[in-house]
Amino acid sequence: MNTNPFFALSIVLVILLIGVQTTFGQDRKWQLGVDAQTLFQVASADPFRLSMGNRLGLWTERPVSQRSSIQVAASLRNLNGLQLRQNELFNAYLPQEFRRNINSTMLSSLRYVDLGLSWYYTPRRAGPWALGAGVYGAYLYTWRGARQTNTWVSGEQLRYSSNPSAGGFGISGGSSTRSLSSDPQPLARAAFQSFDFGLQFHLRYALSPGLQLQCSYLQGFRNLITPELFGQSSSFLASSFHLGISARIL
């Protein structure tokens, strides 16, 4: 993949800043900031397993009343350590040879460019706590995974050796085992959904003016993988908890 996600994110942010200023006017001041979060994605429901990732973003926020505000954010979200695997086993019996083939498909990570719109409400005027809810859309820009075939070959071998004392040659039998591995083949885009959308919920606490601790939950609506990935229907949704720091820069 040759797409530069940081360039794409910068273009999206510039469009957002121009769009929101044009749409809502400039009667209230927009704030600009950055955030960095560690996320925990539900990689498996049975058994329950979480994988770690991260999310880095830029946001712009505008007050709409004394206790509420709207925020537009663009971010890069990395779902790492997924370790989604499927193995297919095939046995082949040949004359004097037995072959065991294992076709493995492994998905390690998914990486998205996110665009979100959220509304925040502060229960107490000038209080440190704020609640938020919103929507997001995501585009899959790259991934990491591969398909590979490993083969174990067991066979009988005949060994010929000279036997001068008997005036001829001797024949003995034996067995051998060897392994073969194919080159890993990268996964195609057809194995994934390129776009996703869903809801996100936030809880944040102001540590100091311009610096906030934020906890979020993101729930996607679309299955992120297609039957092309594992050769059968599988369900994998974006469902993650986020914890991080948000800082205002303007």
Image (cartoon, grey):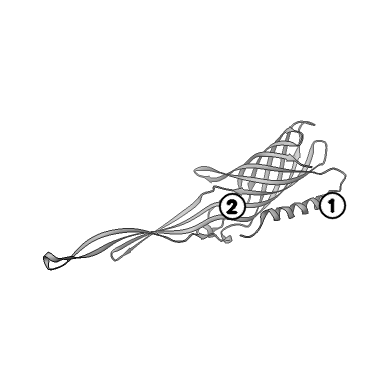
The image quarter in which residue 4 lies: bottom right
- Figure check: 12 above or below 32: below
Tell me where residue 202 appears, x and y as whole percent.
69, 39
Tell me where residue 186 appears, x and y as whole percent.
53, 60
Quarter of the figure with the N terminus: bottom right
Residue at 49 percent across and 52 percent down: it is 85
- Figure check: 234 above or below 211: below
Name the outermost residue toward the left. 166
Would residue 232 be visible to someone looking at this image? no
- Element type at mark 1: helix
Relative to 69, 108 lies left or right: left
- Element type at mark 2: strand
Relative to 40, 87 lies left or right: left
The residue carrying pointer 2 sits among few (fewer than 14), some (14 to 19) or many (20 or more) residues within 10 Å by Cα, namely many
Name the outermost residue toward the front. 164
Q: Which residue is mark 1?
A: 22
Tell me where residue 119 appears, x and y as whole percent.
75, 42
Q: CA distance from mark 1 to mark 2?
A: 34 Å
Q: Amino acid at mark 1?
A: Thr
- Figure check: 123 above or below 30: above
The image quarter in which residue 153 lies: bottom left
Name the outermost residue toward the right. 27
Q: Which residue is mark 2?
A: 110
The residue carrying pointer 1 sits among few (fewer than 14), some (14 to 19) or many (20 or more) residues within 10 Å by Cα, namely few
- Figure check: 235 above or below 166: above
Quarter of the figure with the C terminus: top right
Q: Are marks 1 and 2 in contact (CB under 8 Å)?
A: no
Mark before the other along the chain sequence, 1 or 2: 1
Relative to 149, 243 lies left or right: right
Q: Amino acid at mark 2?
A: Leu
| Count of numbered marks | 2
